[in-house]
């Protein structure tokens, strides 16, 4: 009997101890939640708000934008903080974590929430295209974080495809005498043209003309 009473006492003590531990854990968890809720996010660093493209396009034409950036591109006066005398080769992955800016020196797009990357926002996209080569500027030059640079590439490609942005293609004169259309013209001409031209055009802005002699072997002809 004495043993049974002792076992019952032990079991009741264990149950009480478990109850106390559970109650403490629950109280700590609720307090932690309350602390998180009490933390206020700085509105200037909050990036959870979605700003429509139309608002961004209006902002780029407003006096507030001109007062902030002037006539220069938005990335001109941006300098990234880094240790030592040389900047890191890659820009940071992202400036925003969990909808809040996590760095003291965010990239030119992340620091201004009204700069929205979209294929319709031409005035912003033009600032990231080189006026000399017509190609998209590197993230190392503009200082954009990798996430925003990828968004920029997608937006510019869409703008090119849908005709919002134009790109230059060099004009090349075509001569019917040197053009071999189905072999008919070449058969009529008694004297074949001296140096036929083979045009190798890559994607954009590059047009390479390579003169090839008619006696050259096939291995010399670029594909
Ligand atoms: Zn960024």
Image (cartoon, helix red, strand yellow):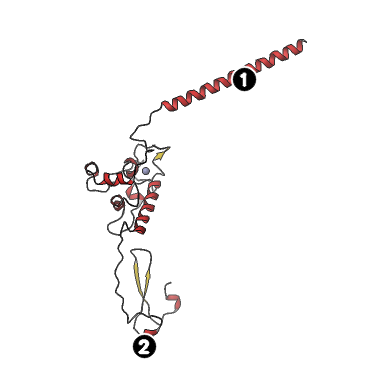
Residue most toward the bottom? Answer: 190
- Residue 120's x, y, as percent? 32, 52
Residue most toward the top? Answer: 2
Residue 64 falls left or right of residue 164: left
Tell which quarter ligand 1 is in: top left
Q: Residue at x 54, y 23 (%)?
A: 26
Looking at the image, is mark 1 or mark 2 earlier in the sequence? 1
Residue 12 falls left or right of residue 101: right
Quadrant for the N terminus in the image: top right
> Which quadrant of the structure image shows residue 158?
bottom left
- Residue 68's x, y, as percent? 24, 42
The Cα atoms of the two marked residues, 1 and 2, are separated by 102 Å
Q: Residue at x 31, y 76 (%)?
A: 174
Q: Name above or below for residue 109 compared with residue 190.
A: above
Please name the residue that numbered disc 1 is placed on.
18
Please name the residue that numbered disc 2 is placed on.
188
Q: Name above or below for residue 139 compared with residue 1.
A: below
Disc count in the image?
A: 2
> Which quadrant of the structure image shows residue 193?
bottom left
Quadrant for the C terminus in the image: bottom left
- Name the one closer to the observer, 6 or 23: 23
- Name the one closer to the observer, 213 or 107: 107
Check if mark 1's residue and mark 2's residue have beta carbons within 8 Å: no
Mark 2 crowdedness (10 Å alpha carbons): few <14, some 14-19, many ≥20: few
- Name the one closer to the observer, 141 or 157: 157
- Name the one closer to the observer, 209 or 177: 177
Whether label 2 lies within 8 Å of ligand 1 gets the answer no
- Secondary structure state at the residue bearing disc 2: helix
Mark 1 crowdedness (10 Å alpha carbons): few <14, some 14-19, many ≥20: few
- Secondary structure state at the residue bearing disc 1: helix
- Residue 107's x, y, as percent? 34, 43
Q: Which of the labelled discs sits on residue 152, or is there none?
A: none
């Amino acid at each position: 009997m004495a043993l049974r009473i002792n076992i019952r006492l032990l079991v009741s003590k264990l149950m009480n101890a478990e109850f106390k531990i559970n109650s403490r854990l629950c109280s700590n968890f609720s307090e932690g939640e309350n602390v998180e809720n009490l933390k206020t996010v700085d509105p200037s660093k909050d990036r959870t708000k979605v700003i429509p493209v139309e608002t961004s396009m209006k902002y780029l034409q407003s006096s507030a934008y001109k007062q902030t950036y002037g006539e220069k591109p938005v990335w001109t006066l941006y300098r990234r903080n880094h240790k030592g005398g040389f900047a890191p080769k890659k820009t940071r992955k992202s400036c925003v974590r969990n909808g809040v800016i996590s760095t003291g020196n965010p990239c030119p797009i992340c620091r201004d929430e009204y700069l929205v990357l979209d294929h319709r926002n031409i005035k912003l996209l033009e600032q990231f295209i080189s006026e000399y080569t017509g190609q998209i500027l590197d993230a190392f030059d503009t200082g954009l974080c990798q996430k925003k640079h990828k968004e920029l590439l997608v937006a510019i490609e869409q703008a090119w495809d849908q005709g919002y942005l134009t790109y230059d293609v060099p004009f090349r004169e075509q001569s019917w005498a040197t053009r071999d259309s189905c072999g008919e013209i070449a058969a009529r001409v008694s004297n074949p043209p001296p140096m036929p031209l083979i045009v190798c055009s890559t994607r954009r802005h590059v047009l390479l003309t390579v003169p090839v002699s008619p006696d050259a072997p096939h291995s010399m002809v670029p594909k």
